Amino acid sequence: MNIQQSTTIEKRELAWEAAKAITKAPEPPTPVALAQLQMTDAAATVITLPRPKNADEPLDASAVQDAQKIIRQAKTALIASGLSDDAAEASILWAIGAGHSEIKAVVEGKAGAVGTVANWLVSNLQFFDVLPDAPAGGDVEIAVTFGSSQEDTEFPPAERMTWAEFCRVMTRHQVGQKAGPCIVPAILNGTRRLKLEAKEIHVLVLDYDQGNDLATLVNAIEGKGWTAAIASTHSHLTTETKVKDVHWRKYLEQSAAPSAAELLAQKGYVPSVCDGAKVDREVDGYVFIRHPPCPKFRVALRLAKPWRAADYASPVEAVRAWAEAYEAVADALGIPFDESCTDASRLFYMPRHPANVLPVSRVLHGAPCDAFSLVAPRSSSGAGKTALPSRRTRSKKVEHVDASTGEVFDLTAWLREFGRRFLIVDALRARRPDVFANKVSDARHHVLCPFEGEHSEPGMDSATFVANAGEGATGGFVIHCRHAHCNGRDRAAYVSQMLEDGWLEVEDLKDPRYLLPEPDPVEVAIERLNASEAVVVIGGKTRILIEDLDRDGQTDVEFAQVPDRRNWHAPDRVMIDDKQVPVFDIWLNSPKRRQYSAVVFEPGGARPDSYNLWRGFAVEPDPRSSCDRFLDHLRENVCRGDEHNFNWLVGWLAQMVQQPSEKPGVAVVLRGGRGVGKTIVGEYVGAMMYRRNYVQITQPKQLVGNFNAHLKQALLIQVEEAFYAGDPKIDGPLKNLVTSDVRMVEPKGVDAFPVRDCARVLITSNEALVVPAGNDERRWAVFDVGDGHKQDHVYFAAIADELAHGGAGALLAYLQEFDLGGVNIRLAPETAALLDQKLNSLPSMPKWLHACLREGAVDTSGEWPEQIATKQFYEAYRHATARDRYAREISQEYFGKLLREIIPLLERVRPSNSGPRPWVYAIPSLDVCRASFSKWIGQDVPWSD
């Protein structure tokens, strides 16, 4: 039966009275104390129920009956002691808390009854089924969207309910498989679950899958004072994690001391999950890691202010703002979370659990979460930029205040000056040798974490280590903790806490005993210039290579002459023997200067003495993200549903990823009207690369101009719109761009130098004639892009949104795994669009002959001749060509040669009749001539169109 809120509170109070009586129970035991002992036994029975090996198998029936019997006996004993029926039921709830702490939370009003125990209470004792009361906003109305599975393509309208009702829904588990009923926190504009279709969100939902326990989450949320519903997910307490075997092999190659535990630690799992982790088996392309049970939870927070897409300038800006607020909330809680859940249309399964896993849930009272107040304002200097800085790069000034003197010590400034010199191990051993775990590996000394009090399991473990300056890869001192609570903390935070706790004193930080010798100013100057400049040889001349960060934070390379660079550095000097000496000259004359004998572009790897312009791909492969919308666009629109053409096109992209040094010799041409989705293909693929590796050309001078430094690092060149295939100034350079293996790079003010040309060419145009395709053409793979989504802004915005949320990493992972064995990348598919380019590129004579073959006649007779005078045939060609001022007329001799090349069975003969016998052509039938023309041009020509 349902009990109103007031009755719930009364029951809770009576339960606590029963608890007090138990605590003060005299001897012999009162009925209440006896009930407590019986319930403790019942709880023990619950905890020790035999666990089936298969998650779908039910619990042991006899054990369940025994536990139910004990519960009924306990209720009878409590009523006999004088408690009312309601008070007895409430006391049972409290008593079961002795074995299952989450039931105690129900009595406190912080959770609903969940799991197996709750089911027993409801079914056997007709126990109350209350909504978790949330006095601070439990009656506030929210709205969410429900569905039946992740495969849903259409979702019903959102449902409205109170926050208390929502908490009950999100904390009531059902036994069953993970897939099934689901929830989308967003209210959708229509029925499609797309980011750009999200209209409004009242609840922010986070997933925590890396082993943080319930107490950690509760403490973090209560620390913010927020109201929340917390529930374990279907994979709660899982004891295995699967990793793709390719990722496992890559990890083994890159790690000095690889282990399953270390891999999990790198992924952010808490130490209690990592400890003892081992590879269990390898099946179907996955490595399965066995580890201790891993807690996994879902947290729902009510928002103080709903997110509304209409409040932003565009749908894209709206979903970006949602992701920023989402990450700001997660950052505020300070616990690693599933970052893929930032999607505004994210779907979550309803609470479910295997039969052999006891679920856990909790409802916390508090205030709603003001997510948008947590978002850091964007810098005014970043006009036009909308990306939020990575959480790993956000930092702030750290200061330590001496409690006795009030002196403020700037730790951030100290790190800049002494971070590369501080011997933290030596300083700690002198002050606090007791914090060391007496475990050292690779110069890393394991210690107690300064923040160990915040860990789920305080105390010494192997998750925290320190290393002296000069002993690690970074050069500076190191302190790191793998506990989730410490995720994102920098060295300044740890040192600050050590000062606070007396592990170190401020004077230790500058004590010469704990510092490496101050570096030589000359060495510092050389190191500083080496960080961004190098001496290179170009065309036998010495030049200065300059690495600089562009506006997008990517490395750009420029070249300068030595005198110009010396003038630039003229004010930069260092004191040597009481004399100011130019730093540039010191560096230029030092044997320690960075220098290279050549500048190359070698995706396959370069010699150590060569400067390689190739930087690899700009994103990490991410198989967890999706590029499905982009691939569907390639299949359905670019390739118009032709699976063979789709496989070839994806293979062309995959070969660029898997074999970037091997140029395929074939360019991709996308032809179609405006707004059909041509340009987005290059932009999506180019997003995998650094900006200098993906070059867009919109003007002929960018291709054929004197200065082409912008092409020196190109792996993909997208040529857009502005080219005419008949322009002889363009034809040669364009063909050379597709097939040449060497490119001459000519920066301004620097002699041209050769680099390996690995660039692939992607051409997009809405012109009929795009590329100069010959009859035996093999350079061009031409696709006519369909117009089914022409000017469909929602469709293309969804693709752009997919790209903005990991699509590039997903595409890179997909292309890395694509099997090139079944695709001949060097043989362009014979598409109708390619044939159209060939026909439009034909010289005057084959173009005229094609027209005759289509008409089935050479002249106005309307008949296909069996023979015709050679001069008459040639004059018919000349007459037709004269009307085309762009056509280049050929001689009669070359006309005949080309005619016999196209139609090999044609014969030049003299008639046998008397009188003058002019030469004639004996012409095969129309069908034979058409077949010969198709063979000559390399594709079947449709003659009936």
Image (spheres, rainbow, N blue to C red):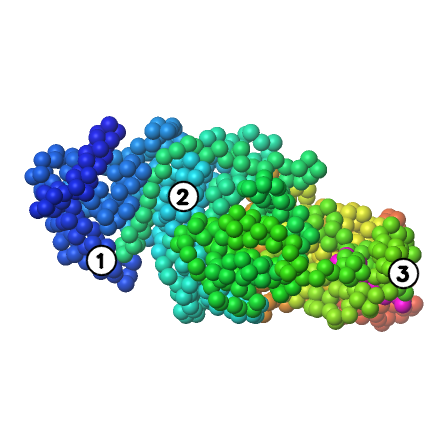
Q: Secondary structure at mark 2?
A: helix
Name the residue nearer the viewer: 133 or 819. Answer: 133
Q: Position of residue 795 (x, y in %)?
A: 57, 42
Q: Is residue 613 left or right of residue 434?
A: right
Looking at the rendering, the stretch of residues picked out in magenta corresponds to: 531-540
User: What amino acid does circle 1 point to?
Assistant: Thr
Magenta run includes residue 583: no
Q: What label does residue 675 carry, if any?
A: none
User: What amino acid does circle 2 point to?
Assistant: Asn
Name the residue nearer the viewer: 178 or 34. Answer: 34
Residue bearing mark 3? 751
User: What amino acid does circle 3 point to?
Assistant: Asp
Name the residue nearer the viewer: 139 or 753. Answer: 139
Q: Secondary structure at mark 3?
A: loop
Residue bearing mark 2? 219
Question: In the rendered view of the protein, which quadrant contains the N terminus?
Answer: top left
